[in-house]
Amino acid sequence: MFDFITEEHEMIQVEARRFAQGEIAPIAAEFDETGDFPIETIRKMGELGFMGIEVPEEYGGIGMDTLAYSLALTEISKADASHGTIMSVNNSLFCNGIMKFGTEEQKQKYLLPVASGQKIGAYSLTEPMSGSDAGTMRSRAVLNEAGTHYVINGVKSWVTSAPYADYIVLFTMTQPELKHKGVTAFLIETDKPGFERGKKEPKLGIRASATSEIIFDNYECPVENRLGAEGEGFKIAMTVLDAGRIGIASQALGIAEAALEASIAYAQEREAFGQKIGQFQMIQQKLADMKTRVEASRLLIYQACLAKMDAAVSGRRYSLESSMAKLFASETAMWVTTQAIQIYGGMGYSKELPIERYFRDAKITEIYEGTSEIQRLVIARSLTGLR
Ligand code: CAA
């Protein structure tokens, strides 16, 4: 139907679906309940190449494109959004930034093990007092007199995968008086002195993807671990988030697809008032609207993937396409999972079925990597050019 979807894209989609339905779906409820980190399946995903899809083979990935990444992530998230979160942070937020802004040494040292899934990567921008307003962080990195390393202090919050991350792309202030232009990015090794993990957040959804604060107490980061130039950090963070938002849109699509398919099956089998509930117009209307919104999300995601692939050649920003896809797909996931619970009634509210998990998992897609309000702000600014 779409000539930009090649045989190779279909192959990775089928492979991701096979793994997701065979190995992830059966364990998703248990890991949601315990909140344990699914390290075994994540390692297997690494062996299959899912932890570094767009990373060239020489750096441990499988060298495919953004569409391939999006198709695979949708399939993984359809089985379990927590696995989807861990996969998306590794691919979009960790690998992407180093691929684009890293030195050859940084790529060899950090990209290779994370893209191949042997190590876990994370991305840390948010702080307790700086979320949507990402240019106002309080953490600091100060270059020592000898110019050999930066001393980092401060607290970062809501860091996905932090409890298990080996390496983290950190954004912190080197020149606070310059605001956005005073932010610098660093590559952090989590086994070094001065780095500590805070308590794991008890979350509503994506419970198997671990999230925590991280604390820097005179952490010494060698100069060669600076990612990009001093003051370039805010642009790096935003560029990486443009890519990341396509990932979250793809995750949201997977959650919505799972809820829609379950709703169709239930409408076909559940009877009330002497007929299948799918014969009632009120259920039909829900299913029709759910399907339409799911397909509209898919098209916006394809558009964003193509825009990102084009940007690799033209250098053009694709913030508009990426934010539209994330906004629409995440709001679709929340709406579709709400309808799914309504269609299932009491059974949808029960932990015996995955429907309530889809609903809980959908919510985060409207929040992380930029809330729906921030996506609307990015879209409107890109239309008017006004700040
Ligand atoms: N690409 C490149 N450069 C960009 C950019 C982009 N997408 N967006 C902004 N910039 C540049 C601007 O051009 C500007 O550069 P100049 O100073 O040279 O003109 C500079 O960055 C500052 O931009 P703004 O004036 O637009 O900055 P702002 O303070 O108004 O903020 C914002 C813009 C869009 C609101 C931004 O702060 C934002 O996206 N906030 C949300 C942050 C977010 O998504 N946080 C989630 C963190 S990750 C996470 O969720 C956790 C996880 O682990 C999954």
Image (tube, rainbow, N blue to C red):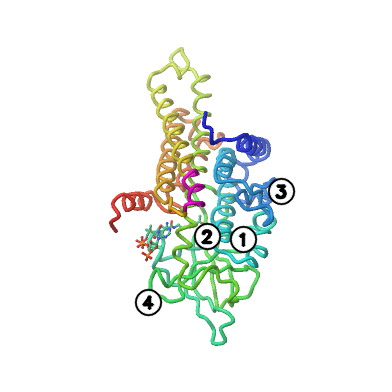
How far apart in space, not on screen, are marks 3 and 2 (Cα)?
A: 24 Å
Name the residue that disc number 1 marks.
165
- Pick whichever, 234 or 198, lies toward us: 234
Write down the quadrant of residue 292 in the picture: top left
Q: Which residues are magenta?
A: 305-314
The disc, 3 or 2, on the residue closer to the chain's N-terminal end is 3
Name the residue that disc number 3 marks.
47
How far apart in space, not on screen, are marks 2 and 4 (Cα)?
A: 25 Å
**Disc 1 residue type (three-letter):** Ala
Looking at the rendered image, the disc whose residue lies closer to the viewer, 3 or 2, is 3
Q: Name which residue lies at 65% across and 57% down.
A: 114
**Residue 310 position in % (x across, y down):** 49, 47
- Mark carried by residue 342: none
The disc, 2 or 4, on the residue closer to the chain's N-terminal end is 2
- Which type of secondary structure does the marked residue at label 3 adopt? helix
Ligand 1 contact, mark 2 (Cβ < 8 Å):
yes
Q: Name which residue lies at 49% across and 32% down.
A: 348
372 left or right of 232 in image: left
Looking at the rendered image, the disc whose residue lies closer to the viewer, 1 or 4, is 4
Name the residue that disc number 4 marks.
177
Q: Quadrant of ligand 1?
A: bottom left
**Disc 3 residue type (three-letter):** Glu
- Number of other residues with Cα within 10 Å of mark 1, as a class: few under 14, some 14 to 19, many 20 or more: many
Name the residue that disc number 2 marks.
159
